[in-house]
Image (cartoon, rainbow, N blue to C red):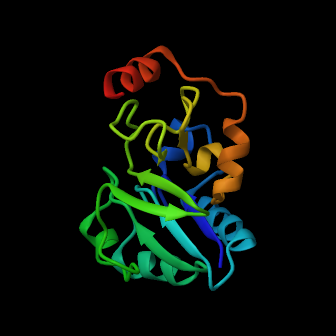
Amino acid sequence: MAIWFTADTHCGQGGIIRMCERPFHDVIEIDVALIGAWNAKVRPGDHVWHLGDFALGHDADTLREIFDGLHGTEFLVKGNHDTDEVLALPWARPPEKPVEIAADAVRIVACHDPVRAWGALGRTLHLHGHTHRPVPDPKGSCDVGVDSWGYAPSRIADVRTRLVGVTLDAEERREIRRRD
């Protein structure tokens, strides 16, 4: 079983195409592409942590059809655009915000919004969405949203590779000094 992370799919939200310069013409095309990219990587027995903003704009039946078409067991960390219809989908456990989990022997703080400094900085990996990658990832933190990862989920190994060579920024150094 592999563990995957993703965020910001925004299924059904036409405005996200223009806002994030996604190469799609309409919500049907983007939904089909997102499902295809997800299922190309995720196997039925895998776990997928979706870090918010799963969908916005679809009715409950369409949401369920999309959800049922995705491989894996899905978990949700609530995002700012996750509606009651999204929260009502059959997630593996009730959606929450934020969560602390372990994957591939790594402690992870997962939430929708980025947290630039937190008490466990340097001891955990912080995964988030929301930013659609407008700023570089700081050391120990990574946007796992689809706009950063070819519209597909990523694994911890992928995140670690992306963060190779990233150094602590001034804010992170101050936070670690303050804490220690």
Does 120 appear above or below 137? Answer: below
Does 110 appear above or below 130? Answer: below
Q: Give the percent coordinates (x, y) of residue 15.
A: 46, 45
Residue 55 seen by the camera: no
Q: Quadrant of residue 106?
A: bottom right
Residue 97 seen by the camera: yes
Q: At x 55% / y 64%, what residue is drawn? A: 103
State the residue lying farthest toward the left: 84
For the N terminus, the quadrant is bottom right
Q: Is residue 141 left or right of residue 93?
A: right
For the C terminus, the quadrant is top left
Q: Give the percent coordinates (x, y) of residue 13.
A: 45, 54
Q: At x 29% / y 57%, what residue is drawn? A: 97
In the image, 93 versus 102, the foreground residue is 102
Q: At x 64% / y 85%, what residue is drawn? A: 44
Q: At x 43% / y 75%, what residue is drawn? A: 63
In the image, 4 versus 55, the foreground residue is 4
In the image, 6 versus 155, the foreground residue is 155
Q: Give the percent coordinates (x, y) of residue 71.
A: 61, 80
Q: Is residue 95 left or right of residue 46?
A: left
Total labels: the figure holds: 0
Q: Give the percent coordinates (x, y) of residue 144.
A: 56, 49
